[in-house]
Amino acid sequence: MEKRDAKDDVYEMLSQSGYSDKAIEYFKATENIGVLSDADLVSDLTGPCGDTMKISLDIEGGRIRDAKIQVLGCPGAVASGCAVVNLAKGKTLDEAGKIDVDILYEELEKLPDQKVHCARLAVKTLQKALEEYQNQKDKGTEAQGSER
Ligand code: FES
């Protein structure tokens, strides 16, 4: 009897559900998954569906040097999280702040219609992290200012 490849099964299921090949690649690749040990900022966000994303950013000279994401959620969340991290890497904080659902969706090419909120959660997680980093930096500047 011919052995079935579980990976092909997953591909077929996702493809039939409406995921593009590119979104499936993001879902299957592991390079963007995890938490950076030397992160400058780690932030997480839970969506209304209950899925959670944790993003970690390594920022140097106002630029995102590296980023990773940990996802407790559906394939749409994993693909979106990995794609948003991939888009953010190498960008300045301002450029990363401009990543929106349309840009992410362009990168993913296609998700099933009912999975658009997964892309939204990935974008919101990144934006929350960027805001927190900015607040952290502002506080640092304030503290330095008050020491004088
Ligand atoms: Fe919740 Fe996909 S179902 S992020």
Image (cartoon, rainbow, N blue to C red):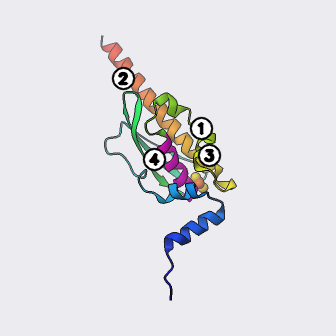
Q: Is residue 82 left or right of residue 60?
A: right
Q: Secondary structure at mark 1?
A: loop
Q: Residue at the location (49% across, 82% down)?
A: 3
Residue bearing the label numbered 3: 105
Q: Is the Cβ of the residue at disc 4 closer than 8 Å to that at disc 3?
A: no
In the rendering, which numbered label is found on residue 89? none
Question: Looking at numbered disc 2 in the image, what kind of residue is underneath it?
Answer: Gly
Answer with mark 3 or mark 2, whichever residue precedes in sequence: 3
Alpha carbon of mark 4 to alpha carbon of mark 1: how far? 18 Å
Return the x and y of residue 22 as percentages of the image width and height. Answer: 56, 55
Alpha carbon of mark 4 to alpha carbon of mark 3: how far? 20 Å
Mark 1: few/some/many CA within 10 Å (<14, 14-19, 20+): some
Alpha carbon of mark 2 to alpha carbon of mark 4: how far? 23 Å
Residue 55 in view here:
yes
Asked whether mark 4 lies closer than 8 Å to ligand 1, one says no
Above/below status of 30 relative to 63: below
Q: Is the Cβ of the residue at disc 1 closer than 8 Å to that at disc 2?
A: no
Return the x and y of residue 7 as percentages of the image width and height. Answer: 50, 69
Alpha carbon of mark 1 to alpha carbon of mark 2: how far? 28 Å
Q: Which residues, given as a range, are shown in magenta?
A: 74-87
